[in-house]
Amino acid sequence: MKKIVCTLLLLGGLLPAMLAQAGIIASATRVIFREGDNEKSLMLLNTNDYPIVVQTWVDDGDVNAAPEQSTAPFVSLPAVFSMQPKTMKGLRLIYNQQSLPTDRESVFWINLYEIPPTRPVIPPLQPSVTMAMNTQMKIFYRPKAVVAAEKDAPKPVFTLKKEDNHYVLLCDNPSPVYLSFSRLALRIGQQDYPVQQESDMMTPPFGSKKYRIDGIVQSGAISSAVVNAAIIDDQGNAVDQQYAVRK
């Protein structure tokens, strides 16, 4: 999944935030480094009708951290470059061999920070907005022990819990890999109750995470509930799965 952060640089009129879209498209939605891999590459496409400057770096996902504060074991090259409209550029991702856990996956984030020209070509007197946008993509590092055990990894366990005036769906992940969800919903009878969407729907290896659910009124039928999930695979595809709810 991508996370996009927008920073207003120059405001010449009002533009709904929902219209803001990143102009860079990458050739993959995530990058998988398996133990022994030293380098991967991505192709980037500037879909904008104007040139941009792109800054790239890898970090732990903190959107407020400056690039120079990153301690991630991956380097992106080139770090800064320009792209003309509708052109492509190759990006190298290099693992610096820093020690990482050997019993579970690790995750980091590629940042693609695109800066448009301060004076884009627009009709005179037209309201306009110039925005710098940061698109984040995941890098997963997968040790050999995890790759070997991946097919036989235990399934997640879901438990429904009442907290204050709402329910939470607790996901326990007993496997050594991250579980990335594009969708999670509790199904009671013929009714679906989706969890509250978050910017990052991941449950960590050997860990757990709570997902809030609002609107449940059929409390008497919860014993027959199931969880419908869409799990994102290595290719970025959403794979539908169904799980029982632990009583």
Image (cartoon, rainbow, N blue to C red):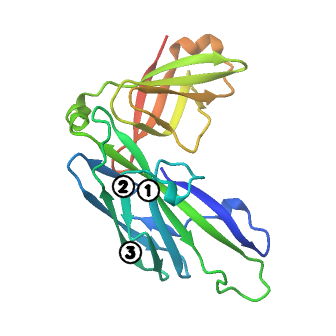
The residue lying at 68 percent from left, 85 percent from top is: 122
Label 1 close to label 2 by CB (< 8 Å)? yes
Task: Measure how far apart labels 3 and 1 are at the Cα level.
Answer: 18 Å
| Amino acid, disc 3 | Lys
Residue 89: which disc?
3
Label 3 Cα crowd, 10 Å radius (few <14 / some 14-19 / many 20+): some
Q: Residue 243: where, in percent of width, then height?
A: 42, 24
Task: Measure how far apart labels 3 and 2 are at the Cα level.
Answer: 19 Å
- The reply to whether residue 27 is visible in this rendering is no
The residue lying at 28 percent from left, 28 percent from top is: 153
The residue lying at 71 percent from left, 18 percent from top is: 164
- Find numbered disc 3 in the image and state the secondary structure of the residue it sits on: strand
| Amino acid, disc 2 | Phe
Mark closer to the chain start, 3 or 2:
2
Mark closer to the chain start, 3 or 1:
1
* 89 over 109 or under it: above or below: below
Residue 170: which disc?
none
Residue that badge 2 annotates: 74
* 64 over 221 or under it: above or below: below
Q: Residue 159: where, in percent of width, then height?
A: 51, 18
The quadrant in which residue 223 appears is top right
Q: Residue 17: where, in percent of width, then height?
A: 70, 60
Residue that badge 1 annotates: 58
